[in-house]
Image (spheres, rainbow, N blue to C red):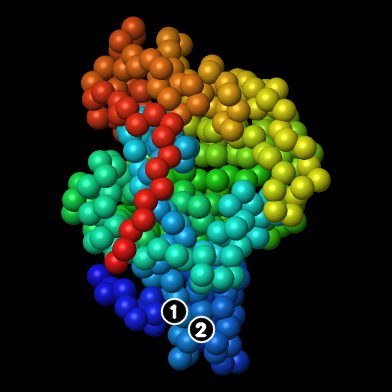
Amino acid sequence: MHNAMNPLEDFVVPTRYWRRLVDGRIQCDMCPRACKLHEGQRGLCFVRACQNGEIVLTTYGRSSGFCVDPIEKKPLNHFLPGTPVLSFGTAGCNLACKFCQNWDISKSREIDTLADAASPERLARAAHELGCRSVAFTYNDPVIFHEYAIDVAQACHELGVKSVAVTAGYVCDAPRIEFYRYMDAANVDLKGYTERFYRQITGGHLQPVLDTLIYLKSETTVWFEITNLLIPGENDSEPEIEEMTQWVVEHLGPDVPVHFTAFHPDWKMMDKPHTPPITLTRAREIAMKNGIHFAYTGNVHDLYGGSTLCRQCGSTLIARDWYVIRAWNLSDDGCCPNCHAQCPGVFAGAPGSWGAKRMPVRLTA
């Protein structure tokens, strides 16, 4: 593992996914954006840069903050429910979503945003000492701090702590394979289901995200769930939700949970209204009609839309009130007590009792 704590230059580490171009520029091959950089330039993500004729990561070991959250906030409903997760991010992002809900972090061009520092080993110890069952790379996309995330995941695994990626899935093939070798769970943000939406609203493309989802399903054992933030007038039409959920069932199967979450005006999209709860409920109904067994509503108070029902008999297996588990009806091996059907996911006996608490944490190297 890297020893990247002090001094400031030691936050800079070499990377592997890049190539030299005939015109002298260096192309970053971490994500499909393929930034082509002259010496001293940074990629759109802000944290990967061209130094001394190669691409380096400039923020290894630095974070915009650490916080213990409920795992359901990621959102993951089928991965160690009720347990605390140590969440952190860095600065920057490789997409340019106009509606970004974490824009103060993901769009930051200020190293000062990175107020905290922690080696992978320190971070893993903190998670273990705080009683967290997992660590989540979130707030901004771990694709761009690939090397740091992998080292943290390895350090966590040595202490029995699992690793969770909260990601937009916008990554190239080779780094995708390496990255998910070390992840236990992921929530992938499928931001829409049209190329127009991705190109105009996120500055990216749809197909690489679909490729990530197919890869996770067909080539890994990573537990993953999907989030779809519904923005009024942009990606919330019933035909688009029909098409997207049909694609999920056909290519990923009916057991991948899908979370339809509410938009609130933010960043460069202040002109759109909040998502009406009825839009989320309708999306959930469409998803279930098309065969998705576990469809949820999020960012709204919806007891029914937030609860887990048995895919076979419809019994309530986990009743949730926001991030609080109100009822738990799963057997220790994750089965429905009524019909004994298995509930897909990662369960370990009784649920945790972390609830909705949010606990900021300060770490030092």
Residue at numbered disc 1? 56
Seen in the picture, residue 10 relative to 109 is either above or below; the reply is: below
Q: Amino acid at mark 1?
A: Val
- Assess disc 2: are there few (<14), some (14-19) or many (≥20) residues with their C-alpha within 10 Å of its C-alpha: many
Q: Are marks 2 and 1 in contact (CB under 8 Å)?
A: yes
| Secondary structure of residue under mark 1 | strand
Residue at numbered disc 2? 50
Location of the C terminus by quadrant is bottom left
- Residue 87 location, x and y as percent? 40, 49
Q: Residue at x 22, y 47 (%)?
A: 129
Q: How far is the residue under mark 2 from the one under mark 1?
A: 6 Å
- Residue 343 location, x and y as percent? 36, 23
Q: Residue at x 45, y 91 (%)?
A: 52
In this view, the residue in front, 132 or 53, is: 132
Q: Amino acid at mark 2?
A: Cys
Residue 136 visible somewhere in the drawing = no
Q: Residue at x 50, y 46 (%)?
A: 188
Seen in the picture, residue 280 relative to 338 is either above or below; the reply is: below
- Residue 209 location, x and y as percent? 55, 52
Residue 330 visible somewhere in the drawing = yes
In this view, the residue in front, 365 or 53, is: 365
Q: Residue at x 78, y 42 (%)?
A: 272
- Residue 335 location, x and y as percent? 30, 18
Location of the N terminus by quadrant is bottom left
